[in-house]
Image (cartoon, rainbow, N blue to C red):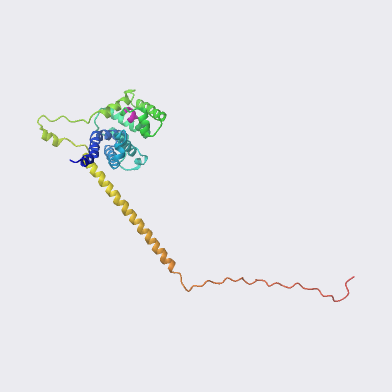
Amino acid sequence: MSPAQSLATVPEAAFDSMYTHSVRGLVRQVELLTGNPGFAWRAVRRAFDHAWQRWPEVASDPDPVGWVRASAYAYALAPWQQWVPGHRTRPRAVARASSPGSEHDRKLRVAVLRLSRAQRQAIVLYDGLGLDLPVVAAESEASTVTMANRITRARGALSAALPELGDQAAARLYDILAEPDPVPDPAPDSTPETEAATRPAAPRELPAARMRDVSERNVHRRTLAAVALTAVIAGATGAALVVTYDRVGEVPHHAQPTPVTAPPTAVPQRAVPVPTLSGPPAP
């Protein structure tokens, strides 16, 4: 392999490594923020799509995974997502879902969803991931004082919602996000081949190479859409100019300007009568 080919494979290898080691953890975080597993996969895939399109910027970032995480959080917690059908799961739906974990964990997920979007992000980053306060503030684009207040209020709300856990409610978030995905015990008479065939695959998960291919196709589609839109706008502008030119040419050439004259006086001026002297003046 030539040096040029070796350098060409470096971005792909770095992206594939980051994607493979962080995709499921990011999905677990967004699922905790939104309560919607399907939407969590969509948000994370969209974040990796943008990361591959801007890979030089992401690769030079001190925390590439943090760059992807911030993109996924911003999309998942956008206010307009509340109005998109299928992008929101209410706390009651999470309580009824048969998600893995204990009853306390399900109640904790519901309590997190009852927090505001800013408090959810703060508590997940600080208590769930264990990031430092300045890092959480920078990623959330807020001051450290504001972020500290959000964390304090979120912890108080979780403790009030789960009095049986008390102050351990926030610490349990770290355990939920740190736990690996549960793997079912194999059947006694199963073989490695049958176990691999029957093991359920993660929903909507794509291999790293497939993720890069999808991202590149998305760029191609967006480019074609932009070119088509530009052509439509140019065609509409040209048609408008032609119609305008034709209408200007429809003015009759024999039309002559009408001379403007002063209007006649409506009432003719009368002369002032001159008095005549017909005799001696009156005494």
Which residue corresponds to the image point at 41% horizontal and 65% vertical from the top-left? 245
> Is 124 a magenta residue?
yes
> Is 79 a magenta residue?
no
Identify the image quadrant of residue 59. top left
Is 129 placed above or below 272 here? above
- Point out the image quarter for the N terminus: top left
Identify the image quadrant of residue 159. top left
Question: At which x and y percent is residue 113?
Answer: 33, 33
User: Is any atom of residue 116 visible in this view?
Assistant: no
Question: At which x and y percent is residue 150?
Answer: 39, 29
Magenta span dominant secondary structure: helix
Q: Nearer the viewer, residue 206 or 56?
A: 56
Q: Nearer the viewer, residue 258 or 27?
A: 258
Q: Specify start and end residues of the magenta stretch as a single range.
A: 123-127
Which residue corresponds to the image point at 27% horizontal and 35% vertical from the top-left? 27
Is 140 placed above or below 269 here? above
User: Is any atom of residue 71 visible in this view?
Assistant: yes
Question: At which x and y percent is residue 102?
Answer: 25, 27
- Point out the image quarter for the C terminus: bottom right
Question: At which x and y percent is residue 36?
Answer: 29, 37
Residue farthest to the right, as pictured: 283
Which residue corresponds to the image point at 24% horizontal and 36% vertical from the top-left? 14
Number of numbered discs on residues: 0
Is 28 placed above or below 233 here? above
Residue farthest to the front, as pictured: 3
